[in-house]
Every structure is written in C-alpha cells, then in structure tokens.
Image: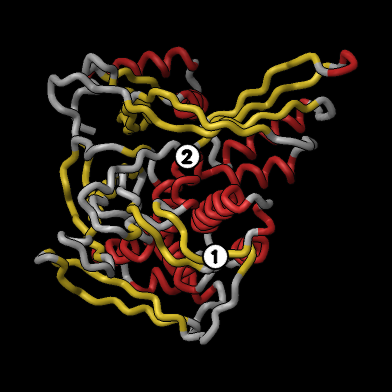
Amino acid sequence: MLALLDCPTGLAGNMLLAAVLDLGVPLEVIERPLDQLGLAGRYRLQVQERKSAGLRGVHVQVEPLESEPAHRSWATIAAELRQAPWPDALRHRVLAVFALLAEAEAAVHGIAPEQVHFHEVGAIDALVDVVGVCAGLLQLGISQLICTPPPAGHGQVHSAHGPLPLPAPAVLEIARRQAIPLASAAGFGPGELTTPTGLALAACWASSFGPMPAMLPRQVGVGLGSRSLDRANALRLVLGDPLDPAGAAASPSLATVLVQQAQIDDASAEDLAALADLLRRGGALDVLVQPVSMKKGRLGHSVTVIARPQQAETLRQLWWQHSSTLGLRETLQQRWELQRRQRQLDTPLGPVGVKEALLPDGRWRSKLEHDDLCALAERHGLPLAAVRAIALTALSTHPSEQPC
C-alpha cells in the first residue's frame, strides 16, 4: 500500500495519530501496545470529529492522568521498549523514532544520547503518539510512505528549557541528519508548526520527501491540529495504489540512505556470514564484506551496511551484540533509485517471483527470483537452466507492462 503524508500546515504526533484513526484503525490497535508498556490508566485518549476552517477531520488529545508525569531518560525508555511484549516490527519502529529524537536532543544540548532526559518528548502524550502511530501504520499495511516537506514555523516556543527559537532546535537537527527538506513558513503567524516528535515519525517512516506521486487514492484520513490558523490546520494521510503513467518517462527518485561501516580482523568466515545475515534480517538493504589489509599487515574485512536512516538504532544493536568491532562509522548519503515493484508469475511448473524496475524511458526491467527457480528445479527434478527457460517463456507471454 502506497501512502502520502500531506502536511501543508506542519506535522505533529497527535495530528498523525488522528489521521490514522480517521482511516478506520480500531482504537484497540492503538491502546493494546500501550497497555503492554504499562501505561494503562495513566492517560485518557480524547478522540473527536471536528472542523478546522470548514474542513472536517479528527482531533486527538492525550490527557495524562498523572499530576506530574516523570521525566524519562533515553536509557530508561529504550529498556522499557526493548522489554515490551510486542512484535519485532513495532519494537523496531518505535525504537527508531525515539533513538532519532535522543540523538537530535543530544546534539542540540552537547551531551551523549544516553544522558538525554526527555521532558516534552518523554511525557505520556509523546509515548502515546509514537507507539500509537507506529502501531496504526503497521495495521494499515503501508509498504511505502512519501511525505511532503512540512513548514516548521517561526518565532519562539516555550519549553522545559525556557523559550526556544523556531524552528525548534531538535527539528532542525532531525532535518539536517535525515536530509529532510522543510517548506517555508512565510505567510504563517509566529508559532510552532512541526514538532520534533512529528518530524521524527515522518523521518522513520517516509522513504522520500517530495510532491504527491502518481497514485489512485483509495482512502483519506484527516488529522486536525489544536492551533487556530488562518487556514485549515490539518494533515492528510492518503492511501492508494501507485500508477505508472502510460507512455511517460519514469524519473528516478533521490533518496537518503544510511551507510554503516567497520573493519574487523578477528572474525572467522562463519562469523562474518552470520553477522551479514543478521544485519540483512534486521533491515539492511545490502551488506558488503570486502577483504582489506589492516595494521601490522593483518588481513581483515571491511563490512559495509546500506540501510534506511530509520533503521540506524536497530542495526547498531546488532553490530554491538554480534560483532567484535569497537567502533562504527556512519554517514548519510544520497542515491538515485528506480521505481521498483514485485509480482508473482504463474508458470507451468509453479509460481515464480519477479522483481521489476521502471527505467527512465518507461520500460520495465525484470529479473526472476533465483531462490524460486532453485526450489522448482529441486521439486521437479529438472536442471536449473531448464526451469529458467520455462519461466522466461511464461514471462514473455505476460510482459511487465501489464498490470500486476
């Protein structure tokens, strides 16, 4: 499922949570993981349908039921999240959001991430927003999310540290780290439009930031903000199917990827193979292992991981737990990506997966899934080359230009 997060008046966690609920995600899906985190009875979720400048939508407000919610350190939050009885997909997403917030706050205040004590972010309402949004988006089955550049605001905002300039320092740091474009706040009155929590959620879910792609809209969820503006204070979460414009050139998209790298000289081939497999299963897009000559003439290996930025924290934990490296280099890089999709091809021997990439001239380039070909060869007792020939014949009669 393709999703567009359209945020012309900014982005906040409660607005995104409201849009998720407006799309029909049951409240139980939001509250169950929060109960498992031990937050039952510590907050009240007020969900109302309202209007903003004539536009209907859903407004969500989290009401803490504790008189003075405790400030939580990143170390405390991380431990609680890792111990929660959640599916791995939810745990990884929530950890990624809070890790990004911790790293941004640490950079702003000049301290280590483990020393960060969240005030606004660590309060009950932000935990509800982050956990609820991640649980809701997973429930919706979103495979790709594109976010329009949000305006961040201007002026000042009051915080636990006193007045802060806008855009909020943590918002600017997240945008810098993740290479997120911010729209102009010209025409808006002074005030905060995008919050650190909202931008961290978008950063950890969006594959790219830009205009609406060619898509067939299926559902629209509208989340309303609390501030009164001179226009509708709303964001829209649009679900739909991607479209391939007939005869039109397909432009590659520019995306930001995370590159992690370490040199290791004390691991066996089996250890390196296991590490690479764990990193791939942990969310890495690719893992490269190359032989290198290291200090004192020792032979070692350079291990490089390419991943989405939101997977940084999850992958770091795998490095620390399953490798002997004492340090890990990280950089953000930009790469051009072709539009891709997957489909299943029916052949006389059985189904075979097909990976396809849309070239700039509008043609689809196809590649048969090697593992599927091997499985069919073993099942039917045929040479791999014979199975591939049969599958290629089936592919020629069902070309890639046809709808999947």
Residue 20 is at least partly visible in this image: yes
Q: Is residue 391 left or right of residue 313?
A: left
Residue that lies at the very extreme toward the right in this rendered image: 296
Picture coordinates of residue 325, whole percent (x, y): 77, 35
SS for tag 1? loop
Q: How is the image coloured?
A: secondary structure
Closer to the chain start, of discs 2 and 1, is 1
Q: Within the image, what quadrant is residue 340 found in? A: top left
Residue at (66% x, 66% y) in the render: 76
Q: Within the image, what quadrant is residue 196 found in? A: bottom left
Gap between marks 2 and 1, in whole Å? Answer: 22 Å
Q: Is residue 92 left or right of residue 172?
A: right
Q: Within the image, what quadrant is residue 241 found in? A: top left
SS for tag 2? helix
Discs 2/1, front = 1
Residue at (81% x, 18% y) in the render: 294
The amino acid type, in three-letter code, at marker 1 is His
Cβ–Cβ under 8 Å for marks 2 and 1: no
Q: Which residue is mark 1?
A: 161
Badge 1 density bin: few <14, some 14–19, many ≥20, Cα 10 Å: few
Picture coordinates of residue 297, whole percent (x, y): 87, 13
Q: Which residue is mark 2?
A: 176
Picture coordinates of residue 238, whole percent (x, y): 22, 51
Residue at (56% x, 54% y) in the render: 105
Residue 88 is at least partly visible in this image: no
Residue that lies at the very extreme toward the left in this rendered image: 54
* Camera-side residue of 163 and 241: 163
When the figure is inspected, residue 197 is found, relative to residue 67, above or below; the finding is above
Residue at (42% x, 61% y) in the render: 135
Q: Is residue 149 left or right of residue 291?
A: left
When the figure is inspected, residue 204 is found, relative to residue 115, above or below; the finding is above
The amino acid type, in three-letter code, at marker 2 is Arg
